[in-house]
Amino acid sequence: MAEIKRALLFINLHKTNAQNLVGEMLQELQKRYIEADSFTFENKREFSREGRYDLAFSLGGDGTVLFAARAMAPLGIPIFPINLGTLGFIAAVPPGEWALVFDQWRDGKVGISERVMLDVAVERRGKLLIRGVCLNDMVISASGIAKLIKLRVESETEFPREYMRLGQYRSDGLIVATPTGSTAYSVAAGGPILEPEMEAFIINPICPFTLSNRPLVVSARETVFVELEAEQRSGILLTLDGQVTEPLEPGDRILIRRASCTARLIASNRRVFYNALRTKLNWSGTWGGGDA
């Protein structure tokens, strides 16, 4: 049985009935002798609470899970995603079933899905500007009216050490996505869908000027380097998980590699992933003569 003494609730108060569910959960957790704190997911402010937790609950949609993952994954704390939105690719536990699933997980009957995350660092004039982790994707895009930006993309593997020039992009931007993020912005930009526990990245140009620039799937062992060319017609913005933003400058160098931590998601397995795919993408067909 998983020993849980203290839990943290990430709460998206924009979701209907979130506050009512919190009251119910605090009572149920108290019955199980679990101390609980809460952090409201409002205005996308970053998590800064001190304290040691054994588990984090995410009360919202997939966006709330992304927020919780950036805060909890570096600490090795698993996340229990309760879905208060529409059908999500990550948040899957219905609010009326959370206690049952939680007890099943503590009894070893429900597993944890380990998800690759990105470690993103920005260097400016040879010095580290910012560094952060994300679960879905890193996006470099134009922030002005002129959308076309100019990028150089390279990659390097460590074992064996190999350096590769992937090319120059003239595009509206660039997405580097994890398998978890393959069903988000990347798929809308024409990228492939990957199983969420794969160890790979997607490098996906957004509306490339040259039609031969296509999405590329690379091993998560690679480090991807993106350099902004000196001549740009627009401001440029870096976005992590669609929630954290940072303005970039020409000449900045962005390093994207596999993070040392993983997002540990409870009850967010392959069945959840494929159910969401069938529903959101309206897949249909027949199997064995009956409805799929």
Image: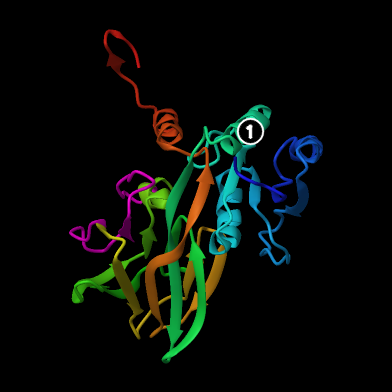
Q: Residue at x 42, y 70 (%)?
A: 146
Q: At x 37% / y 61%, what residue is drawn?
A: 175
**Residue at 77% across, 49% down:** 36
Q: Main secondary structure of the magenta part?
A: loop
Decide: is 115 above or below 91: below
- Image x and y of residue 1, in percent: 59, 40
Residue annotated with mark 1: 103
Q: From this viewpoint, which residue is outermost toward the front?
A: 1
Answer left or right for 28 relative to 92: right
Residue 224 or residue 158, whichever sits in front: 158
Task: Depth check: give the residue in front, 249 or 163.
Answer: 163
Query: Where residue 288 sits in the image (x, y, percent)?
Result: 26, 10
Q: Is residue 208 among the parts visible in the rendering?
A: yes
How many numbered discs sit on the rendered protein?
A: 1
> Does the magenta segment cover residue 202?
yes
Residues rendered magenta in the picture: 188-216
* Residue 176 on image: x %, y %: 37, 61
Q: Is 23 on the left or on the right of 256, as rendered?
A: right
Answer yes or no: is residue 143 visible: no
Q: Is residue 165 magenta?
A: no
User: What element does badge 1 sit on?
Assistant: helix
Eyeballing the image, is 167 above or below 15?
below
Q: In the rendered view, does 201 fall on the left or right side of 113?
A: left
Q: Amino acid at mark 1?
A: Asp
Question: For mark 1, does the 10 Å Cα neighbourhood hold few (<14), some (14 to 19), or many (20 or more) residues?
Answer: some
Residue at the image point whose x is 38% and y is 75% from the top: 255
